[in-house]
Image (cartoon, rainbow, N blue to C red):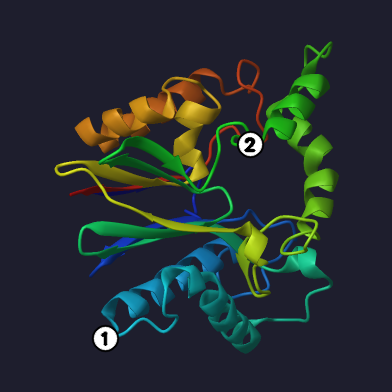
Amino acid sequence: TIVSAASDAENEDRGGAAGAYAWVIDGATDVIEAPLTPGVTDASWVAATLDRLLGEVARAAQPPFGSLAGAPGWLSERLAEEFGRVVRRVPEGRHEHPSASGVIVRIEGPRLHYVGVGDCTLLAETRDGFRRLVTHERDAGDPWVAQAVAAFHAGRQETTPQEARAHLWPRIRAGRAMMNQPDGYGVLSVTPTPARFVTAGSIEPAAGGHVLLASDGLMRLADVYRRYTAEELLAASRRDLDAVVAELRAIERDDAGCRRFPRAKASDDATGVLLRF
């Protein structure tokens, strides 16, 4: 089952499954006025390009990167080639590079191999019990953003989510310059992802068990809104992934002012790929 729900006119997430592979890609919101690529946004372009490249990998007789841990490096090389062909001007700095988070899995016999970069998450029912992989609850949901938005709203009765976002924007934009820097953070982009930011491994799913690949917009139900634990979110998605996304949107509509759950974006693209073994 694949569900990808846009939060605005343009969906900057992608979810896919083909052959032995499945993936979720979450394009990072643009921090420039006009896209550098032919996409409606650079975020949608990078998500669509990675989605296409992974489709090519899934159809190939042999993977072009050997073990799945090599996928981020190969994807960065291909992204750089694609970006070089279509870019409209030279980027002013690293902060203008299109980028995305992603989690990719490959099934080999009884095992599921995974690799992740950024804030997409893998939830799995394994032979050894429930596992949350790639991200950790303590770091998820952009806690610094929640704190900064709450501080901005404190004592201001008339502020809007748009004003809070504008207040944070310079800090968010400056932070982009740290992408794929050794002392920064890791993403899939036109520069290689430092190895320390790549999470890879393998698990053995339980017979009849489920695995959910989720963008951070879907993980908000556990990491921001606390509607579910991560394990409960997997169980709810197993029952009805469309209903889970509908519940997510209802929570966001009910807190459109971002007061109960402080956040920079009132709503975010939400994507889940649910696999059953």
Give the mark nearer the N terminus: 2 vs 1: 1
Vertical position of residue 51 compared to residue 90: above or below: above
Q: Residues within 10 Å of mark 1 (few under 14, many from 20)?
A: few
As rendered, which of 255 and 200 lies closer to the eye?
200
Image coords of residue 180 (percent x, y): 72, 64
Q: Amino acid at mark 2?
A: Asp
Please provide percent x and percent y for residue 11: 47, 53
- Give the distance between the C-alpha atoms of the residues marked 2 and 1, in whole angstroms: 38 Å
Residue 162 at least partly seen = no
Figure check: 49 above or below 217: below
Nearer-the-camera pick, 25 or 8: 25
Tell me, yes or no, if residue 131 can be seen here: yes
Q: Of the residues shown, which amino acid type is indicated by label 1? A: Ala
In the rendered structure, find residue 139 and report the number of the disc placed on it.
2
Q: Is residue 101 above or below residue 92?
A: above
The residue that appears at 49% across and 24% down in the rendered structure is 253
* Direction from residue 14 to residue 70 in the image, left or right: right
List x then y, in percent, for residue 52: 40, 74
**Res 145 → quadrant:** top right
Q: Are marks 2 and 1 in contact (CB under 8 Å)?
A: no
Q: Is residue 118 above or below residue 149?
A: below
**SS at badge 1:** loop
- Residue at 71% from the left image edge and 55% from the top image edge: 185
Tell me the element at label 2.
loop
Q: Which residue is mark 1?
A: 61
